[in-house]
Image (tube, rainbow, N blue to C red):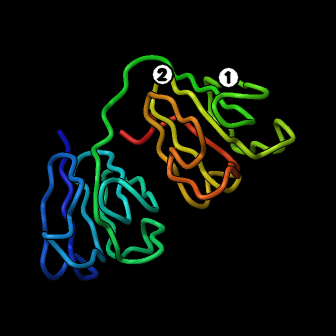
Amino acid sequence: MGKITFYEDKNFQGRCYECISDCSDLSSYFNRCNSIKVESGPWILYERTNYMGYQYILKKGEYPDYQRWMGYNDSIKSCRLIPHHHGSYRMRLYERENFGGQMMEFTDDCPHVYERFHYHDIHSCNVPDGHWLLYEEPSYRGRQYYLRPGEYRRFTDWGAMSPRIGSFRRLKDFY
């Protein structure tokens, strides 16, 4: 079980809300989010309701202002607890939508997609095993996209606005 507390103001001040499970709409509990305490997790936070918008992965710790979790603003409207995964990790990336074009299968992290494969646009993905995090930029920087087991027929299915992926890693060191 996880536990996360959201605070409206910086440094854990103001109105707060404690959450122990997934919540698709946090907007009735607080107006803005400027600090967070994660007592157990990890959690994925979303800028908009219904698990939409920018995504942020937070592991156990204290975040006294939104810049500490690399937030673009003080808007957090939904959250999910990321379940602990025991077992292997496997992900298939495709250069075209609907699993078309060249396919590459991965079982490990990749800090720089372009250096390794000479292209960086990923249009679809299949995750048979494990939980993964895609990043827009190399070296695990930029916007993050959480992928749990399932099929993603186009990059918009994982919440991206473009197919550009710079790096990715397994979500195994976040527990």
Q: Quadrant of residue 27?
A: bottom left
Viewer-closest of 45 and 100: 100
Outermost residue toward the front in this view: 98
- Check disc 2 and report its element: helix, strand or loop: strand
Q: Establish if 131 lies above or below 16.
A: above
x 63%, y 36%: residue: 124
Left/right of residue 121 with respect to residue 141 in the rendered view: right
The mark total stands at: 2
Q: Is residue 68 above or below residue 39?
A: below
The CA distance from mark 2 to mark 1 is: 11 Å
Whether residue 30 sits left or right of residue 132 in the image: it is: left
What's the amino acid at mark 1? Glu
The location of residue 134, given as percent across then percent down, is 58, 45
Residue of label 1: 105
Query: What is the x, y in percent for residue 152?
Result: 53, 35
- Which class describes the residues within 10 Å of circle 2: few (<14), some (14-19), or many (20+)? some
Q: Looking at the picture, which amino acid does disc 2 mark?
A: Asp
Could you say whether the residue bearing mark 1 is in a helix, strand or loop?
strand
- The residue at 83%/43% (across/down) is 119
Residue positioned most to the top: 87
Quadrant containing the C terminus in the rendered view: top left
Rendered location of residue 67, percent (x, y):
45, 74
